[in-house]
């Protein structure tokens, strides 16, 4: 299909474009920007007057729940949620059932996702067999099957020697290790941020040092091995200071933050609202402000949705018993735009917000997507930055309907999502 997107405000941070320009798509790729290539005849015209045309969003953490947790979500429902949210590429953690520690499982997931012809799926392979933290997986075979990195998801490695060996192995083949800094013992039973709110509510706490102690270990192992590490879901001001110093030192690290943590704090637990039960927990206002500033100065490289659909049976429980997680694929764009509106001055607002969920995220994965250069794959998100919509279970395509933003009115509604040159979603 040949598509002409006309009269749109094109924003492509990777190539420094922020102007009204037409986009021409043919054979799944960008055929031209500004002017049509010779002999181009569109079979479909999208009028983007008053709309923003941007690269498709790249989400660094979206649990699709397949295989094994189909009662929480299915590949069909979550891929629909992705394109409805403008997400054209997503990274999925390996904590499925069975765990993504065998090449056959990775190939099956990739095949299932490709057959749906929606967003591109990039699996993370398990760093250790069964995510048990005991023996390493065959990383080379998993990479050949399509894994773009290796992770323990939220399962910590108790034996530091195992983590050292994993990072040495990864460095040999230049694989990226994705780790969430969380000490396996400190705050192991915690459900909320250690502080006055948790104390007042009688909830067990997760201290800030659970993140910083783990970070000290990870960063020291990076110094020793030279392995490239991506730090997932940073949540504390103290942790971000360590990351900032490590980056100045030149260590090969990057990091992301969950979209919820940019806006919410421990106070949003309210009266035991289990929708606000997240991993890592919502932190203090000081931590939230540090996250916002770290996005501005580049300490945090990207924003992810941390999409974790949870069913009613596991969410509609007392706060301490509820499963952590929230749906986020369809909120990623709006929450990124809200951060820029609050924190970025002047005309750079849209461009800075889009960069954090496209170009910068794609760079971490090593993808060529996240840009709209001529000849690149036509992954595009067309949205109205001013259109406001109310977050409700009825409008969410994800099978997981739980989010702390239920009832909130947010700006930024996706009008069309194009994946590899075909229209995957159009409102």
Image (cartoon, rainbow, N blue to C red):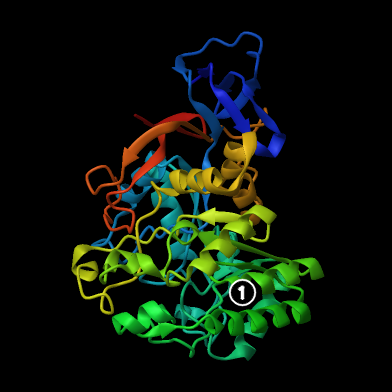
Quarter where residue 175 is shown: bottom right
When the figure is inspected, residue 387 is found, relative to residue 223, above or below; the finding is above
Residue labelled with disc 1: 239
Q: Secondary structure at mark 1?
A: helix
Most distant residue in the right direction: 249
Camera-nearest residue between 189 and 46: 189
When the figure is inspected, residue 40 is found, relative to residue 60, above or below; the finding is above
When the figure is inspected, residue 198 is found, relative to residue 28, above or below; the finding is below
Camera-nearest residue between 47 and 112: 47
Quarter where residue 100 is shown: bottom left
- Disc 1 crowd, CA 10 A, few/some/many (<14, 14-19, 20+): many
104 sits left or right of 395 in the view: right
User: Which residue occupies 60% across, 80% down?
Assistant: 212
| Residue 227, x across and y down, in percent | 72, 72
Taking the image as drawn, is residue 47 in sight?
yes
319 sits left or right of 113 in the view: left
| Residue 169, x across and y down, in percent | 68, 77
| Residue 37, x across and y down, in percent | 65, 14
User: Which residue occupies 27% across, 49% down?
Assistant: 407
Camera-nearest residue between 334 and 341: 341
Taking the image as drawn, is residue 66 in sight?
no
User: The C terminus appears in which quarter of the rendering?
Assistant: top left
Figure label count: 1
Quarter where residue 239 is shown: bottom right
User: Which residue occupies 43% across, 69% down?
Assistant: 282
User: Which residue occupies 68% across, 56% down?
Assistant: 298
| Residue 182, x across and y down, in percent | 52, 80
């Amino acid at each position: 299909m040949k598509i002409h997107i006309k009269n749109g405000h094109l924003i492509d941070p990777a190539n420094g474009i922020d102007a009204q320009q037409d986009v021409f798509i043919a054979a799944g790729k960008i055929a031209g920007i500004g002017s049509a290539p010779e002999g181009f005849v569109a079979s479909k015209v999208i009028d983007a007057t008053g709309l923003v045309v941007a690269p498709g969003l790249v989400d660094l953490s979206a649990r699709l729940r397949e295989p094994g947790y189909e009662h929480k979500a299915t590949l069909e429902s979550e891929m629909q949620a992705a394109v409805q949210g403008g997400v054209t590429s997503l990274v999925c953690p390996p904590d499925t059932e069975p765990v993504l520690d065998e090449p056959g499982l990775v190939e099956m997931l990739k095949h299932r996702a490709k057959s749906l012809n929606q967003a591109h799926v990039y699996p993370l392979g398990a760093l250790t067999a069964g995510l048990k933290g005991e023996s390493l997986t065959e990383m080379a075979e998993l990479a050949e099957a399509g894994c773009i990195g290796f992770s323990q998801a939220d399962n910590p490695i108790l034996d530091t020697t195992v983590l050292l060996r994993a990072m040495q192995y990864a460095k040999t083949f230049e694989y990226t290790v994705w780790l969430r800094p969380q000490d396996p013992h400190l705050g192991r039973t915690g459900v909320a941020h250690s502080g006055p709110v948790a104390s007042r509510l009688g909830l067990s706490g997760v201290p800030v040092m659970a993140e910083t102690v783990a970070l000290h270990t990870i960063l020291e192992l990076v110094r020793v091995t030279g392995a490239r590490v991506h730090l997932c879901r940073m949540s504390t001001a103290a942790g971000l200071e360590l990351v900032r110093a490590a980056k100045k030192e030149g260590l090969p690290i990057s990091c992301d933050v969950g979209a919820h943590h940019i806006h919410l704090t421990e106070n949003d637990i309210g009266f035991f609202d289990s929708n606000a039960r997240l991993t890592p927990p919502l932190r203090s206002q000081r931590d939230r402000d540090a996250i916002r500033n770290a996005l501005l100065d580049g300490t945090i490289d990207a924003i992810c949705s941390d999409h974790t659909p949870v069913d009613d049976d596991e969410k509609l429980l007392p706060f301490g018993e509820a499963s952590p997680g929230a749906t986020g694929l369809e909120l990623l764009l709006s929450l990124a735009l809200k951060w820029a509106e609050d924190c970025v001055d002047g005309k750079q607002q849209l461009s800075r917000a889009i960069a954090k969920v496209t170009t910068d995220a794609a760079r971490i994965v090593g993808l060529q997507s996240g840009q709209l250069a001529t000849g690149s794959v036509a992954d595009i998100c067309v949205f109205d930055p001013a259109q406001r919509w109310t977050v409700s279970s009825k409008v969410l395509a994800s099978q997981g309907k739980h989010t702390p933003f239920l009832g909130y009115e947010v700006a930024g509604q996706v009008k069309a999502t194009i994946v590899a040159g075909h229209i995957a979603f159009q409102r």
